Amino acid sequence: METLTADQRDAKATANAGEPTTAFTGHVPYDAYVHASTLHSLQRTLSGEPGEMSFLMVSQIMELYFGLTRFELAGARELIRGGDAWGALAPLRRATLDLEGLNAAWKALSWMTPSDFNRFRDLLGEGSGFQSAAYRELEFLLGLKTESLIRPFRRSDAYPRLVRALEEPSLWDETMALIARHDMGWVEIYADDGPHNHLRMLGEALTGVAVAFGEWRHQHLLAVRRTMGAKPGSGGSAGIAWLEKSMARVVFPELWEARTHM
């Protein structure tokens, strides 16, 4: 894809008299960069039900948001590992906004009733969001690690990445190591509410991530309850009961527990 300097962009705008360029020698530059044509070719439904298109596309959008959130949190983890709490604030705040976008995607499925879902559910076989490698990696990065949950991926390309995510320190591990190096606890950190308390700001940025991630889990539970009730999940789980059990595992538990003592 051709790159342009600011001067070249100005020259093109002048040559085009302010109109957009409509002739290109190769691929349309936007598609060459975004791969939009590829993205729009991935909605391969198994039925003629319009609800399946919504379900499939929203699932794909969520996968992209899982990857984007993971990217930001991994960057924050590296900064925290290096002792740069200030630097970690920006990617943590971006991750919170990413999670808010992820949560908004549920609205596109809020119309779906059990009868709407049942029209194509059987075609999914054993396919389930439980099997999302990107989501599982995101959970591990947040510190919610369960070794048995990587078993479904043993024969997939994602397995080495998940093993690494399981074994390496999580974002929360690195945060607690940073706090330990300062020889402080969260109660002490929050006692100083001055504008330059970078550790308190770090705690609040992490809280924002935890709240937004918890909202996604809650919205997931509501979506399942709305479309399936208490039926077993497609992937063999107990459905709602499994999700409720999963939600009981809190992200950044020490940060929440400390608030009881502040």
Image (tube, rainbow, N blue to C red):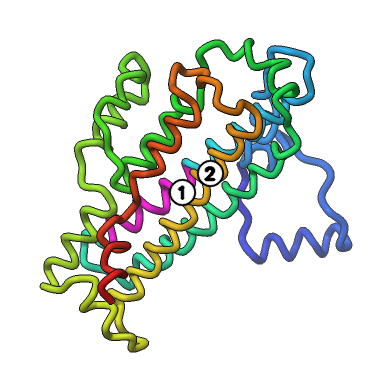
Which residue is more in the foreground, 213 or 8? Answer: 213
Q: Which range is magenta?
A: 67-79
Q: 33 and 238: which one is in front?
A: 238
In the rendered structure, find residue 65 and report the number of the disc placed on it: 2
| Quarter holding residue 241 | top left
**Cβ atoms at labels 1 and 2 below 8 Å apart:** yes
Q: Quadrant of residue 79?
A: bottom left
Does 75 lie within the magenta span?
Answer: yes
Q: Measured along the vertical axis of the image, is residue 45 above or below residue 103?
A: above
Q: Tell which residue pokes out farthest to the front in this image.
A: 230
Residue 231 place in picture, x, y as percent: 55, 21
Is 65 displayed left or right of 254 in the figure? right
Left or right: residue 73 versus residue 197 is right
Taking the spot 87% from the left edge, 57% from the top edge, the residue there is: 19
Q: Quadrant for the N terminus, please.
A: top right
- Tag 1 secondary structure: helix
Q: Position of residue 63 (x, y in %)?
A: 53, 36
Q: Residue at x 24, y 29 (%)?
A: 147
Look at 36% across and 41% down and name the residue there.
139
Q: Which mark is residue 69?
A: 1
> Three-letter amino acid code at disc 1?
Thr
Relative image position of residue 57 (x, y in whole percent): 66, 31
Question: Which secondary structure class fits the magenta region best?
Answer: helix
Q: Residue at x 29, y 78 (%)?
A: 190
